[in-house]
Image: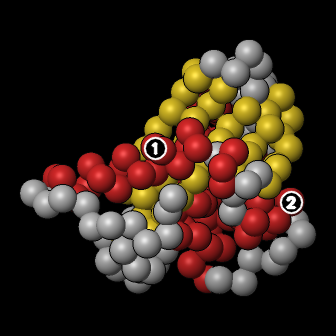
Amino acid sequence: MALFFDGLAEPQNPGVACYGFVVLDEGGEVIGEGKGLAGEPFRPGSTNNRAEYVGLIEGLKWVVLTCPEANLVVNGDSQLVIRQMRGEYAVRSPNLVSLHGEARALARRVGRVRFEWIPRKENELADARSVQAYEEYWRSQGRDPPPMRFRR
């Protein structure tokens, strides 16, 4: 089973922080997905790194609730999050300490977990969910989404 997660914060950092995740079965079929806001828009802490962690956490929650005995490969294009989850980087940002702890606790509740960094172009499914969440936020405000500076 594979979990792909992603996050974004646009049009600046802090901005509108959104996440997306997709879970694939062994045959590559989508069996789970989610998207949404990763924090209150334009408030301190509504950053890209927070959005990445929230995408990971929400995806892990889905796996824990649905198939906790899974052999899971977690894929993300955030080198920071992947390396922190592997224990290769320390978590120095006070804004990320609790998110990292929550992600670690959830990962321990899954049968077996491996964290893998992938290039953004291989993370298109999760990226598309985070972009959808961003667009939905702006439309809920009665506005067209501003152009995204760091995507595509």
Can residue 101 be seen at all in this image of the molecule? no
Report the residue at 18% width, 59% height from top: 144
Image quarter of residue 50: bottom right
Decide: few, some or many residues near mark 2? Use Cα within 10 Å; few <14, some 14-19, many ≥20.
Answer: some
State the SS at label 1: helix
Residue 3 in the figure: left or right of residue 147? right
Amino acid identity at mark 2: Arg
Q: Are marks 2 and 1 in contact (CB under 8 Å)?
A: no
Q: Which residue is mark 1?
A: 129
Q: Residue at x 30, y 53 (%)?
A: 135
Q: Position of residue 96 (x, y in %)?
A: 62, 73
Type of the residue with mark 1? Arg
The answer to which of 42 and 123 lies nearer the viewer is 123
Mark on residue 86?
Answer: 2
Q: Could you tell me which residue is drawn at 69 percent across and 63 percent down?
A: 78
Q: Which mark is residue 12?
A: none
Q: Earlier in the sequence, mark 2 or mark 1?
A: 2
Say which element carries label 2: helix
